[in-house]
Image: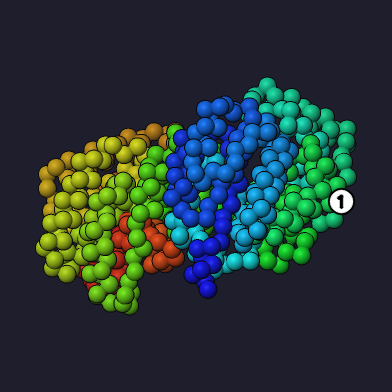
Amino acid sequence: AECLLFFSMQHILLISAYTNLDFLLEQLKLYDNAIDFKIYIHWDKKMFSPNILQALSSHKSVKKVLSIYTIYWGGHNLLASMIELCRCALYDLENEGNPECYIHSISGTTIMLRTTDEFKAFFCTHRGLGYMEYFKLPSPNWHEGGLKRLTLQHPLDDLNIRESQQARAYSEYINMQECKGLYRPLPPGTIYGGGCWWSITRDMAIYWVQHYNDNNLYERLKNTFGPEEIHPQTILLNSPYSKNIKNSSLHYICWDYGIRGTPALLENFDLSYMIQSPNIWARKISTNTSDGVTTFYNWFYTLPPLDLQVKVDDKQSLQQIKEYLLKYSLRCPLLGVMDGLMGVVVYLSCYGKVCDDKRCTVIAKNMFDIVVNQRKNIATADFNNGTIGIAYSIAWLCHYNFIPFETNYEEVLSNYDSYVIKALENKEFIRRVQNPFWNKYYNLTPYLKLRNLYNTSLRKDDNANKLLQHSRQNLFKQSIGMAGVAGMGYNILRSLFSKDIPPFIF
């Protein structure tokens, strides 16, 4: 019965979009090839064109494309467009006999972290539950508790506060209201806030749409700030369905002090955290800044999960992991240590040495040379999947004689040393790297220690170690690197051959 339900349950995606058309079109291919996925899109009216309509409508998963509202950040029109999309989807479902389904609200810059089969299996297992971030207002999650979103007038359907002049006008208007004490009363009842991305059952969606203006809530939320982050929570958490709503959006979103955007534009550095998270989605992705994220996931969707048939600390597991990596790793588009080919090199090098597998050692050496020769093509400098992580891995493998320490490797490391020293002599770089996020991003301390390039002003960051240790947790599927399959194998090697395998991060 569960298998039949798995293949019969429909999934409706309500997508709010206004930019990054190429990225969205690439994502739609994933749903085109799946069963029971239907897409409803609202494209911002001010950015719409016949070419966009044609491009989106050409995908068989797309059932309707709307462009009714001009949407500015924080305005009421995003909520209006989401309700309209949901109404369209529910109307079509009613004509189809109201099949069991989930309705998901996502943005046009969202990527799915699982395959469509894994996605469907998750909601089959948890059927009847809704997923939505929520908290009662006022809440410390929002500035000053969030109530001024409601008590002040925010004319954000008419002002684009992404534009500096209009932002100044908006700020002056808000300040005027506060100075004169022009506060509106709060809507009646218990008010909830949260994120605007969620997954709910069809029955929950019907209730939301039918009761959208209870206590005049929809009308009262006009000229407020971010009502799409208040309206669905307030309706559903005050409904008979409240006990079936889990407090999670199922979205991986990175809030890193606003350094890379609010929220952050995700890049290769974030992949380890995205893959290890239990979430279904991640946002936000930009085709201009994501580097290898979309390329990686196009490959990752095709990567089968590692299915260990024996105890995780048994030597036979090491053989299974080796064969898995030999079969799949060379097609990985990433070269980095945590999710890419360099992580595989670390595991195979260690395995070849302690298990006396000369073939494995030779293959690891060949992979090592591939990474070294292509290192200049890497766009980012982060530890997880960028150049500093690769530099550290080269130094670690050579330092412990897992890879023959040849002259060209020392030349490569000397070049890295000079780059690092130059960075450490730059006061602006040192000031920047004191920020917790950038300290984690570069994670220079292990490399400095291994290469005797000490800089006591830098704090040690343990996130890479945490990723490595979490690689034991095979929640859905893992990357091939040290935050994934290679890391799982390395941890088993460490438990079995602790005298021969040193800590990778120290």
Q: Is residue 17 visible?
A: yes
Picture quadrant of residue 237: bottom right
- Up the image or down, 88 lies above or below 101; here it is above
Residue 161 located left or right of residue 216: left
When asked about the image quadrant of residue 418, the answer is: top left
Q: Quadrant of the C terminus?
A: bottom left
Amino acid residing under circle 1: Asn
**Of the pair 90 and 197, the residue shown nearer to us:** 90
Image point (28%, 77%), residue name = 314
Instruction: Provide the residue designation for mark 1.
Output: 215
Taking the spot 49% from the left edge, 33% from the top edge, the residue there is 55
In the picture as drawn, the residue positioned furthest to the top comes out as 165
Q: Is residue 168 left or right of residue 10?
A: right
Q: Which residue corresponds to the image point at 49% horizontal and 41% vertical from the top-left?
A: 59
> Along the horizontal axis of the image, is 317 left or right of 229?
left
Foreground pick, 346 / 268: 268
Q: Position of residue 28 (x, y in %)?
A: 48, 44
Colour pattern: rainbow
Identify which residue, 232 or 212, lies in the foreground: 212
Q: Nearer the viewer, residue 401 or 450?
A: 401
Image location of residue 114, percent across then percent down: 45, 56
- On the image, the x and y values in percent for residue 486 come to 30, 61
Asked whether residue 138 is in view, the answer is no
Disc 1 element: helix
Residue 139 vertical position relative to residue 182 in the rendered view, above or below = below
- Residue at point 44% right, 44% down? 29
